[in-house]
Amino acid sequence: MLSTNRMSDSYPLLRLTVALLLMTLGGSAMYASVMVLEPVTREFATSRAVGSLLYATFMIGYGLGGVVMGRLADRVGILVPATIGSLALPAGLVMAANAGSITEFCLALGLLCGFLGASFTFAPLVSDISHWFTARRGIAVGIVLCGSYVAGAIWPPILQHFFDAQGWRATFSDLALLTFCTMLPLSAILYRRPPIDASETPAGITRNPKRPLAMAPGSLQCLICAAGIGCCVAMATPQVHIVPFVIDLGHPAARGAEMLALMFGCGIISRVGSGWLSDRIGGLRTLLLGSMLQALVLFAFLAADDLLVLYAVSAAFGLSQGGIVPSYPIILRTFFPATEAGWRIGTTLLFTIVGMACGSWLAGALHDLTGSYTASFLGAITFNVLNLIIVGGLLKRAHTLTTTAASTSASKLNRLEG
């Protein structure tokens, strides 16, 4: 049983379940923008590069909307953003189903489905659930973030089945009806405001509450965002390019798809496990450990060739990288006030999305330039090292400040006793 924050009833556990379901449902639009690429480019007689804008515009809106909706949730609670999103997401899917051009489709996915719709199901929901748990905050955040991986496991095959059976337009209309009928009632369960104490001082702030880790808040936020870019640029290479990487090694594409599914499945285990670990050793140490393991597995990809080895390395990658992103909300809740959680978590997760997008492009560009994925993985490792330098520096700073504070307290006690 998860211990809750100032709550003796089971409502926080219900809220945790609802948040997981909402993130899984919200993820349907993301994977719809991926799965619809081929039929849309065929229908509108356009290139795959242009068709890829569907996913790109959705992710841009998704990331930016997370910051705006997170800020709104800080002010009025999650119910308002959830209600807006639960109406905007189905509206965007209906607009997409009736789109007469790629431009209309991009507007529907980017503005309605992404910015106003699904964006509340990522950073704002994670921020909200972090307020309802204390001793088990890490595992609660990890469980909610599993929703994105669960969505990746269930929506692509479901959508493809209905695309084949009735076409993409009818499928988008049905998905709009499903999300409207489920997300709005689920959002209504989030009616309670979280038990936030505005006067509470975060445990990770030493001495001066206005200078977390003895730094300007903006500087610390920027370093955390830079770390997010570093780890997610590295993360994108195997996640996005595993299928063509496997094909280049002479194996069927289906094997690469199986490896991607294996990554997501092991990622679910990693997300819950890293949350459990964060509750015991803290977010910074958990992030450092996950980043170190991710770097080691990226090196392993360089040597992998045999099919069985590739399966093993893919599983290891899922187990290492799945727990990295959940560490960031825990770090932010440690060093910043609870009243700022929504927009700070939203901003950081926006930069992780930017890192995934840039990493996907960089891996492809390096492959086109060199003719192999060796340079792509070396580039990923370089960005991973950047993450390790930032996180290691922050951890060392925290240790130094803690040691200094303990020594000062001991000196004062000795003087009093003397």
Image (spheres, grey):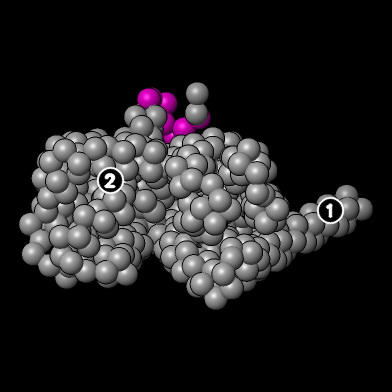
For this orientation, the residue located farthest to the bottom is 369
Is 242 positioned to the left or the right of 86 in the image?
A: right
Where 404 falls versus 4 (above or below)? below
Q: Measuring from the top left, give residue 387's x and y in whole percent.
A: 63, 64
Q: Measuring from the top left, give residue 20's x and y in whole percent.
A: 36, 37
> Are the residues tagged 1 and 2 within 8 Å (C-beta)?
no
Q: Residues within 10 Å of mark 1 (few under 14, many from 20)?
A: few
Is 374 positioned to the left or the right of 328 in the image?
A: right
* Mark 1 → mark 2, Cα distance in angstroms: 55 Å
Residue at position x 84%, y 53% in the image: 410
Q: Measuring from the top left, give residue 247's x and y in whole percent.
A: 51, 53
> Which element type, helix, strand or loop, lies under badge 1?
helix
Q: Which residue is mark 2?
A: 28
> In front: 402, or 391?
391
The segment highlighted magenta reads: 3-10
Q: Quadrant of residue 369?
A: bottom right
Is 79 positioned to the left or the right of 63 in the image?
A: left
Marked residue nearer the N-terminal end (1 or 2): 2
Q: Is residue 147 in the magenta section?
A: no
Is 121 positioned to the left or the right of 248 in the image?
A: left
Q: Residues within 10 Å of mark 2 (few under 14, many from 20)?
A: many
Q: Which residue is mark 1?
A: 410
